[in-house]
Amino acid sequence: MDKIFKALASEPRRRILEYLAVEPMTVGEIADNFEMAMPSISKHLAVLKAAGVVREQKRGQYVLYSLVVEALTGQLYGFLAPYCEDAQRILDARPKRRGRD
Amino acid sequence: MDKIFKALASEPRRRILEYLAVEPMTVGEIADNFEMAMPSISKHLAVLKAAGVVREQKRGQYVLYSLVVEALTGQLYGFLAPYCEDAQRILDARPKRRGRD
DNA sequence: AAGCTATTTTCCTATTTAGCTAAATATGAA
DNA sequence: TTCATATTTAGCTAAATAGGAAAATAGCTT
């Protein structure tokens, strides 16, 4: 739980997720949308990846990042469940993840 | 959005919310459950209050803190909504808050 | 008023985090 | 191989955060 909230406690990182929600992107493409230098973006992506909410795929010399939306929503619903029946219901209705990837 | 995630990006603060989910408590009662000194708890409570997820009521020389569960869930569903239809549905079904308190 | 208890505020230190530049790594192209 | 591009890692500084102790504030109770 700590990793996901630490990851989301950053405006640039939340913005990165918004971009990735539209389509997978390379680090450079993401960085083009920010004032920040690429190494900083790269580190933000590492934080998001450690939290499980993005996935990286090597594509030649590029690295393509994509959102793992079930991980994002799943973790937050998991946190919310004890506070809210709706969240528990949504989790229950969710298809169980097979260890693919 | 920033305040809520910053607030939740702390294990002690998440634990405080768990306690308050059971019943309202004074600062001292909360502090009894932690190794931390009371001033630190008091500061964590201030962060949670700034994020809108707890409310404080003066009760004589005590201060009673309580969870504002709709604020906690509402903000997180609000964040989730663009990523997940379920969250949007839950928000829509939620009774609109009147400016009470 | 004086003393006691509960809480917050202030001030300080240690740790973590964000962002930068420069260097290292990895891949593709000539 | 050599050059160029994409990304990550290292090393640094500045800013933010966490926690403690001590002082300040607020409300009882005598």
Image: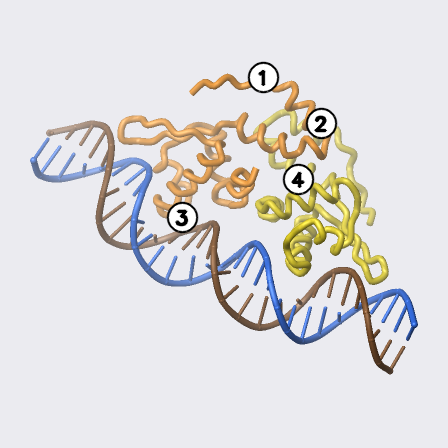
Chain colours: A yellow, B orange, C blue, D brown
Residue appearing at x 57%, y 18% in the figure: B96
* Location of residue C28 with respect to A48 vertically, above or below: below
Closer to the N terminus: mark 3 or mark 2?
A: 3
Q: Is residue B24 visible?
A: yes
* Residue denoted by label 3: B35
Secondary structure under tag 4 reads: helix
Q: CA distance from mark 2 to mark 1?
A: 16 Å
Secondary structure under tag 1 reads: loop
Label 3 chain ID = B
Place of residue B23 in the rendered image (x, y in percent of width and height, measured from the top left): 44, 28
Q: CA distance from mark 3 to mark 2?
A: 39 Å
Residue appearing at x 72%, y 32% in the figure: B84
* Residue denoted by label 2: B86
* Location of residue A47 with respect to B79 vertically, above or below: below
Q: From the image, which quarter does the N terminus of chain B lie in?
A: top right
The dot on residue B95 is 1
Left/right of residue B58 with respect to residue B23 in the rendered view: left
- Frontmost of labels 1 and 4 is 1
Viewer-proximal residue, C19 or B11? C19
Q: Are marks 4 and 3 on the same chain?
A: no
Q: Is residue A1 visible?
A: no
Which amino acid is tagged 2? Asp
